[in-house]
Image (cartoon, rainbow, N blue to C red):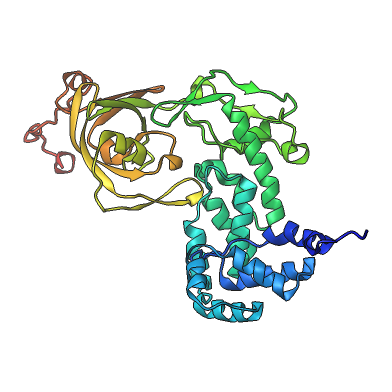
Amino acid sequence: MSKNTNAGDSPDHEQFWCTKDAVPSFSGQDKTYPISKWIQDIEDNGDIFQWSPTQQLLVARRSLTGTAALWFRAEKTFKTWEELKTAISKEFPDTLDQKTVHELMSARKKKPSESLLEYLYTMKELGKRGKMPDYIAIRYIVDGIPDLESNKIMLYGVTTYSDLKDKFKIYEMVKEKMKTYFTTNECGAIDDVMHDVHVVNTDMKCATIHERNAKYDSDSSNRSIDVIDQDVKNNNNNNNIALFTSRSRQKPLKTVKICDKTAEALVDSGSDINLITDEWRRQLGLSVNSDSVSVSGLGLSIIKTSGSCTVDIIIDDKKYENVKFYVISKSEMPFCIILGNDFLQRVTMCMNGNSVWFGTKDDEWLNCMLSEVNVCSDFPSTDHIKDTEVKL
């Protein structure tokens, strides 16, 4: 008795069902996945896996979702892949030009659920579709990583994807290493949990450390990543890390009370304006005005504020009215509040180490420290001097 062979169990049929999901879904609404790319994916995979025209049509129909699927069900039945390809190209024409790609890449940020490599490959593909030079696409990639600019210094200036992937390895290693030493407080700043200088590799050269120190963000976050010796890049040795966390590197902080809530504010005479994180502003329930400014940070990186708010603050039981703060993302600075020159010009500031005192002309303790200089209102008489040259 002969065996009845089912055509559906043939090797070619099994291979097709194993490869039919190689083509991504097409909705017609995703600007990053245009119709031309979808068609190319179907035909490229068809050539690789030797799909027949009928199988290409089947894969195309199964990959339609969203708006594209609704359009397909409302149209006549397409009997061949060529008919479907022609009709769907007219319905969803390519609109992805270079300007659109730049806008998409500028707005695209790394998602918390994404790894750095997943984010890199997504942005790389988008840049290729817009025929964007690699070095420009890489700049968008680095800008889209939600971290302090000082932490990303080592990533700027990279012009090739292979170098960027190497930098990512070091960047991730240091970020993971820093988690061991630092904890995050309630308002998002990073607390220094160590008080001495810890150099794990005694072979690290002091000259290298001091040169890198110019780039190292030594505020209370201590999250800069450029304190790594060059040996780390060569051998990924986790021991080549120097952590500068001595008491002498602490910053002058003041406790500021706003709307019955308190936070530690950095006193920064190098900042022209006062800053507050958007996350802390939301906790305080402050409204935002539309006036925003662009400020330059480390490495002349430009950061645009998202508006401003004006509020009364209390420092050392003294009230200061109508203090204007510009709003900035927590990812751009490691403190809830920065008191800049806009506020410091209103007070007399005294510093001793990291301790700061604010005073005004009405404070008795400050008046005791100031001396008055009495200027003579009357010149002594010179009438008795007869020599006119001496008299003058």
- Look at the image and tell me whether residue 92 can be seen: yes
Across and down, in percent, residue 366 comes to 21, 22
Q: Is residue 301 above or below residue 357?
A: below
- Look at the image and tell me whether residue 28 can be seen: no
**Quadrant of res 383:** top left
Residue drawn at x 65%, y 58% is 159
Query: Looking at the image, which residue sits at the far front?
Result: 1
Residue drawn at x 26%, y 53% is 290
Q: Taking 392 as reference, is 206 left or right?
A: right
Q: Which of 169 and 320 is in front in this view?
A: 169
**Quadrant of res 210:** top right
Looking at the image, how many numbered discs can be counted on the residues? 0
Query: Looking at the image, which residue sits at the far right?
Result: 1
Q: Nearer the viewer, residue 102 or 367?
A: 102
Q: Nearer the viewer, residue 99 or 17?
A: 17
Across and down, in percent, residue 55 comes to 71, 70
Q: Is residue 134 above or below residue 153?
A: below
Across and down, in percent, residue 303 comes to 42, 50
Residue drawn at x 54%, y 33% is 223
Q: Which of 81 and 209 is in front in this view?
A: 81
Across and down, in percent, residue 212 comes to 61, 38
Q: Taking 47 as reference, is 65 left or right?
A: left
Residue drawn at x 66%, y 51% is 164
On the rendered image, what quadrant is the C terminus found in? top left
On the rendered image, what quadrant is the N terminus found in? bottom right
Q: Is residue 382 above or below residue 243?
A: below
Q: Taking 343 as reference, is 169 left or right?
A: right
